[in-house]
Image (tube, helix red, strand yellow):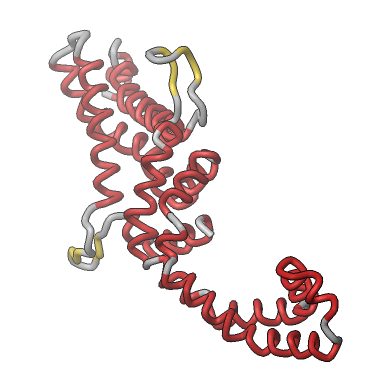
Amino acid sequence: MLESLLAYPDFWKYVSIPFIAGAVGWTTNWMAVQMTFYPLEFLGIRPFFGWQGIIPSKVEKMAGIVVDKALSKLGSLDEFFREMEPEKISAHLTRTIQIRIEEYTDEVMTERNAVLWENLPLLVRKRVYSRARRAIPAVMDNVVDDISRNLDSLVDMKHMVVTQMSEDKQLMVQMFREVGDPEFRFVTNSGLYFGFLFGLIQVPVFIFMPENWVLPLFGFIVGIATNWLALNLIFRPLNPIKVGPFRIQGLFLKRQKDVAESFARLST
């Protein structure tokens, strides 16, 4: 029976279908992932002929989303500043200025009234230096406090991040690639697994309906279905669901801690 099956003229053609479907699924998914990131700049003839990676081409929008959906949810600028321990910042500034307080005082007083300052007795000038030195800690505390309370008007975090990302598209690509590397590998490899499985379904269909349009139609369906399945397995379900001894959750969501660590490392 095996010999007669192997001797069947179309045997190897049918056997090859799931393998070819798997190979095509892997290749198309790999290309899709690469085209998401590269090339960084438009390659071709604008506006219709050519390509630029999806993320680099929308870097300003993507950077805005990073700020709106991630950084801004982590805390306000004031909260970030508080985490930097403004008291220590003030103390450091105080020490730095006090070391050169006489130089700074001379510069300011010379600018205001050079003749008066140069003719003041040394004892008087030393008293001015001493008074300035004592006043510096309170002044620095007030300066740092003012900065903290007015950070939103002093710093536009969204504009800063968008500008930086726009000037360095590779940084944005690196951020997405490193943070989502396991998921992108899953998307690529899932093309092989799901393509092979759909290819097995394709074999009996093609046996009973050996039309030329069947294979291209299945190829189209397989491409959509494999990507749909892969994306849903990455992001769904949002919360863990227990199915018997198994705990099911979206692949990306399972790695929230790792994702947060990678994002923090790349964005600082």
In-image side of 209 versus 125 (left or right)? left
- The answer to which of 91 and 132 lies nearer the viewer is 132
- The answer to which of 174 and 139 lies nearer the viewer is 139
Q: Tell me the quadrant of the picture where the N terminus can be found.
A: top left
Residue 18 % position (x, y): 31, 27
Q: Is residue 9 visible?
A: yes
In this rendering, the answer to whether 81 lies above or below 47 is below
- The answer to which of 15 and 1 lies nearer the viewer is 15
Q: Tell me the quadrant of the picture where the C terminus can be found.
A: bottom right
Q: Is residue 189 visible?
A: no
In this rendering, the answer to whether 224 lies above or below 108 is above
In this rendering, the answer to whether 134 lies above or below 76 is below
- The answer to which of 135 and 251 lies nearer the viewer is 135
Residue 134 % position (x, y): 67, 90
Q: Residue furthest left?
A: 208
Residue 96 % position (x, y): 72, 77
In-image side of 111 versus 177 (left or right)? right
Find residue 162 and report its image quarter: top left
Q: Residue at x 46, y 60 (%)?
A: 154
Q: Residue at x 74, y 89 (%)?
A: 130
In this rendering, the answer to whether 207 lies above or below 88 is above
In-image side of 113 versus 217 (left or right)? right
Tell me how many marks there are. Answer: 0
In-image side of 134 versus 56 (left or right)? right
Residue 215 % position (x, y): 24, 16
Q: Residue at x 48, y 49 (%)?
A: 175
Q: Residue at x 38, y 51 (%)?
A: 66
Q: Residue furthest top?
A: 212
